[in-house]
Amino acid sequence: MLDNFISRTNKTLVARLLSENFKKQAPWYGIAIVSMLVVAAMTSASAWIMRDIVNETVVSRDLNRVFMIAIAVAAIFAVKGIATYVQTVFLSRAGNNIIAETQKKLFRSVLGQSIGFYSKFASSELLMRITNNAQAARNVMDLIVTSFVRDLFSLLGLIAVMVIQQPWLSLISAVIGPAAIFGVRRLSKKVRKIMEQEMVSLGAIIRNVQETSSGIKVVKAFNLEDFMGARMDRHVEEVEARSNAIAKLEAASSPIMETLSGFAIAAVVALSGVWVLEKGNTPGELMSFITALLLAYEPAKRLARVRISLESGLVGVRLMYELLDHPVDLTERPDARDLVAGPGEIRFHDVDFGYREGQGLFRKLNITFPAGKTTALVGPSGGGKSSIINLVMRLYDPESGSVTIDGQDLKSATFRSLRERMSYVGQDTFLFSGSIRHNIALGREGATDEEIIAAAKAANAHDFIMALPGGYDCDTGENGGNLSGGQKQRIAIARAMLRDAEILILDEATSALDSDSEAQIRDALARLTTGRTTITIAHRLSTVTTAHNVVVMENGAVAERGELGRLLSHDGPFKRLYELQLLPGKESFEGAAE
Ligand SMILES: Nc1ncnc2c1ncn2[C@@H]1O[C@H](COP(=O)(O)OP(=O)(O)OP(=O)(O)O)[C@@H](O)[C@H]1O
């Protein structure tokens, strides 16, 4: 029977949705289902009682009986009302819990994905899948439960009333009914296709809003308002057109069904007149039959359309599962062990690595980052500096060879212990929404106020924080929108200071800061890096001069390495970079090398 309502491809999807959600929500669904059965029973009872209403009030005129019937009618509708209330409340409770659980699950699964995953899925797409598609899961569950319990049982009850009251007339209705259902089935495929396109357009709308918001400076600076506006118009109009197309398809079932049903009801009414006159049936039986027939129309219509509604709802569910089932390409081994603390020496042993198959970046790369020392990575853009950091943080795995910390392969370490041993201060200082205190405290769980303030002081951030309205409780705004670039960097340094990990990864900002801010940051960094294994992507000469070692990366290979003095003592790759750096107007190594 299920085949009549769901296409084969969607059957497994529905089975999975049910098995994952039904059991967990069983108490709520149980109560909702019992209430639905009561609603179905009361609907049938209200048709059944029509016989007595007509026969007793019009035909027998027994006043006592009439009062009894009136009370029964009131009771039927009161019980139906209460049952509908209970059904709605508990169905919503189960549904809301499905949305909540699904969103938590989706978010956790997205969090567990590697960095590569994030370049595959745009943030707007993730946003849509986590919000809209979790809602789709609830809608499909609601649809299944209401259709297959309330509507189906109402229909069965009403059919029973019809058959008992007028078996022959019921037979005629039984012939015409399924024809209407058949007409609707053909529409469902078209709905699915348009719905899929609708999801794509919806994603485009979200992306447009997101890009405008995060790139608003570029939008304004380049007068892109009209361009962004026109792009948005296009996407919105696409969604509008598709929504209209879906509405048209869904509505297309109405003329078929209304016409056929009208024909069926008219035929039955005409025949029933003959029946009463010729077969001696009571008018009450006939009224009861006609009431049941009319009441059966709505649930029958919904059941006939359930396929269309399921097809459109399941598009969202499919996208949700696609995200949930996305394989995690960077996993923790089952036998992973916590990294044992040590001095913090990092080594690359014969590392082969590339982002895409057949496009290798590193070939048998060997580098050592000595414990407790600062190593500056320099070199032209695209040379592989960030990729080294990606491997040290195990955001990617090497294809072959290994990256080790104190001789322990990162691949066999737990993620938690690995990340606990590192701090990271990135080029684009990322601040989370919330207060400054909260942003620094993210560096270490359970840090006290005193520790937070000490970290801020060491990062030369305390004074400017105290000058802000609310001090440490000042809100940073979205991604630190209320703070200057230099202030954001010092907060990030304070966060790393609080973490107090023995390995420090720095990706120096390319944008130049004013000299006062720059001096404060340099001073804070000097304090932060002391005694830690530091790998820093250096864009400024000042950073290189304070490093113990310099590694020049070119085309994915180490072009040169050593102490600054030695590298400057002969004409090599570093010397060339260095000299270009000293040319007027050259601010960074990359700029110099290009
Ligand atoms: N996520 C990625 N997916 C595919 N290719 C990438 C990715 N990240 C970097 N690459 C490529 O790998 C090469 C090395 O890039 P990498 O970012 O390591 O260089 P870099 O020296 O840090 O450059 P820059 O100083 O400009 O940041 C480049 O050719 C780059 O295009």
Image: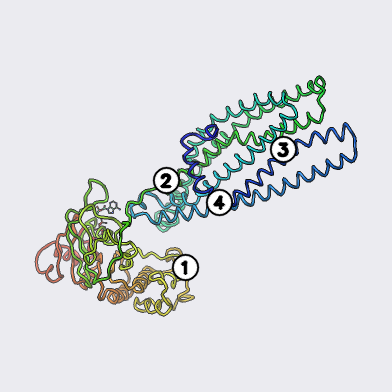
Q: On the image, numbered disc 1 is attached to which residue?
A: 434
Q: On the image, numbered disc 4 is attached to which residue?
A: 25
User: Helix, strand, or loop for circle 4?
Assistant: loop
Outermost residue toward the top in this view: 278
Task: Give the mark nearer the N terminus: 4 vs 3.
Answer: 4
Q: Is residue 545 above or below residue 131?
A: below
**Front position in the image: 61 or 231:** 61
> Crowdedness of circle 3 by 10 Å Cα count: few (<14), some, many (20+)?
many
Residue beneath the point at 87% across and 35% down? 57
Give the residue type at disc 4.
Answer: Gln
* Rendering coords of residue 472 (x, y %): 45, 75
Camera sees residue 228: yes
Task: Give the mark nearer the N terminus: 2 vs 3.
Answer: 3
Quadrant for the C terminus, please. bottom left
> Crowdedness of circle 4 by 10 Å Cα count: few (<14), some, many (20+)?
some
Q: Which mark is residue 322?
A: 2
Q: On the image, numbered disc 3 is attached to which residue?
A: 44
- 406 relative to 562 in the view: left or right: right
User: Helix, strand, or loop for circle 1?
Assistant: loop
How far apart in space, not on screen, are marks 3 and 1 (Cα)? 57 Å
Given this view, does label 2 or label 4 mark the residue nearer the observer?
4
Give the residue type at disc 1.
Answer: Gly
